Amino acid sequence: MDDLTGASAGTDEAPTRLLVIGSVPPTLVSAVAASWITPISTIEQRDGVEAIRVRECAGLPDAAILAAALGPHERTACLGALVEYYPATPALVWIDQPNAAIERDALIGGAQDILGPDIPAPQELRTRLLRAAYRQQAQARIRELADTDSLTGLLNRRGLIRQSVRLVQLARRQECPLLVMRFDVRGLKLLNDRSGHPAGDLALQAFGDTVRVTLRSSDLAGRTGGDEFTIVAWNAGPDAGQRIFDRVAQEYHERTAPECIGLSAGWACWTPSMGSDLDTALEQADRRMCEAKARSKADVNREEETSGR
C-alpha cells in the first residue's frame, strides 16, 4: 500500500485519508485532496475489491476515488465493498470519457458523484465534494435505520444477516471461530395479558439494553423475531456459551421485575471449515433453543400440577 503524501507533521489532528482504487490521474487525485472539506493528508492506493475487503487502512477513509476503467464487474464489486465496509465514506467514480451507461450504473451502485476527464475549477470541485459527503451521510443514516430494530435498538434480521456475512469473511481470513446463540424471551404473552403490551415492550427493550452492556463491540446482536434474538460472538468457542448466557441472564433479570419473564437459549459454534455462511450453526442453535424452551415449559407445567394438588 503506497502512502503518496504522508501524514502531516506537527499536528495532533487525526489524518484525513483518500482511498484511490485503480488507475486515477495524479492531477485529479491532487485536486480532490486539496479541495476536500479538510485537506487530505494521506493517500492510499488500492488495486481492487479484495484490497478493500482486507481493510488495511490505518483509519476510515474520508473519501474514495474509483477508476471506471476497472471494468463493470470489478467496479460494481468495489462500490459494493465500499458501501459495506466504509458506509460513511463518499465514493467518486472517475471516467476518462463520457459514458451514460457507466455513470448510471455507478450512481445506482453507490457512487456519490462522477468526475470526468476535465477537472472542475477548485470552487466547483469543493462544492461537489461537499454535496457528495452530505449525500453519503444521509444514505448511511437511511441504511442504519433500515438495519435497526426500532424497539430494541439492536440489529433487525436484515441488518444481522448483512453484518454476519462480513464477520464470516473476516473470521475465515483470520481462522477464528464464531459462537452463534439464539435467545427466546419467555413469558411475554402472559406479561402482555396481565399488564398490557407496553409492559411487554419494556421487557424487550430491557433485553436490548442488556445485550449492549454485556457483549463486546466485536460481537453482533439482533432481534430476529417477536421475542427471539440472535447473537454472534467473535472468536468464541462452545465453552463460552454458558458463560455468555449466565452473564446475560443475570444482567437481564436485574433489569426486569416481572417473575413471569425468563430466558431460553441454545448455541452452536461455527468454524471456517463449515463454509461461507452461518446456516448450519444457526439451525443447531435454534434447535437447542427450542429444546431448552420446551424443558422450561415442562418444568412450569409440573410446578402448576404440583401446586394444584
Image (cartoon, rainbow, N blue to C red):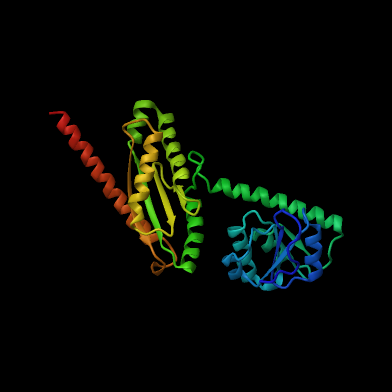
Question: Extreme front residue here?
Answer: 10
Q: Quadrant of residue 58?
A: bottom right
Q: Is residue 266 above or below residue 261?
A: below
Residue at point 16% right, 33% down? 305
Q: Quadrant of residue 90?
A: bottom right
Q: Is residue 244 above or below residue 2?
A: above
Q: Is residue 270 left or right of residue 53?
A: left
Q: Is residue 4 above or below residue 61?
A: below
Q: Quadrant of residue 199?
A: top left
Q: Is residue 199 left or right of residue 38?
A: left
Q: Is residue 78 left or right of residue 92?
A: left
In which quadrant of the rendered image does the C terminus lie? top left
Q: Position of residue 98 (x, y in %)?
A: 78, 67
In which quadrant of the rendered image does the N terminus lie? bottom right
Q: Is residue 68 above or below residue 133?
A: below
Residue at point 77% right, 63% down? 115
Q: Position of residue 268 (x, y in %)?
A: 34, 57
Between 150 and 1, which is closer to the camera in this rendering? Answer: 1
